[in-house]
Image (tube, grey):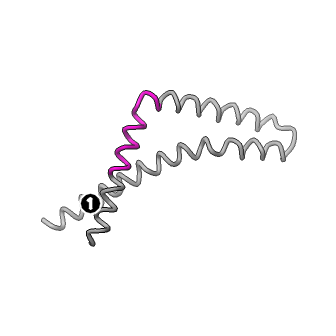
């Protein structure tokens, strides 16, 4: 594997570890609780929407909250996969 690709994997590992640290941080617990409350409120609003258009507007407004979770999860999983790839490369070099 090229050195450039290995450096890319190392960068992904580092970003994943940073995001895991962020996810475990007490401040993230507060943010997570607030996002979950907003998502829950939006679900109730969506269920009580008076029209399909109103329900769609609520869904669109709420979508960024879920995207935050997805971004964090993606970075963590990407970092773990990169770490596993680096481990396999190191094993093959031995």
> Which residue extends farthest left?
94
Q: Taking 57 as reference, is 72 left or right?
A: left
- Residue numbers of the magenta segment: 14-28
**Which quarter of the figure has residue 11?**
bottom left
Q: Taking 24 as reference, is 47 left or right?
A: right
Please state, as top left, top right, bottom left or bottom right, where the N terminus lies in the image.
bottom left
Q: Residue at x 40, y 54 (%)?
A: 78
The correct choice, above or below, for 33 with respect to 85 in the image is above
Please state, as top left, top right, bottom left or bottom right, where the C terminus lies in the image.
bottom left
Q: Position of residue 77 (x, y in %)?
A: 41, 51
Instruction: Identify the residue under disc 1.
Output: 86
Q: Is residue 93 magenta?
A: no
Instruction: Specify few, some or many for label 1: CA neighbours under 10 Å numbering under 14, 14-19, or 20 or more.
Output: some
The correct choice, above or below, for 90 with respect to 46 in the image is below
Q: Main secondary structure of the magenta part?
A: helix
The correct choice, above or below, for 75 with respect to 5 in the image is above
> Which residue extends farthest bottom?
2
């Amino acid at each position: 594997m090229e050195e450039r690709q290995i450096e890319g994997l190392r960068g992904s590992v580092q970003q994943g570890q940073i995001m895991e640290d962020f996810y475990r941080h007490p401040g993230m617990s507060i943010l997570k609780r607030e996002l979950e409350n907003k998502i829950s409120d939006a679900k109730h609003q969506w269920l009580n929407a008076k029209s399909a258009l109103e329900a769609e507007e609520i869904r669109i407004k709420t979508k960024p909250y879920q995207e935050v979770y997805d971004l964090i999860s993606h970075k963590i999983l990407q970092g773990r996969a990169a770490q596993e790839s680096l481990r396999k490369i190191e094993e093959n070099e031995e």
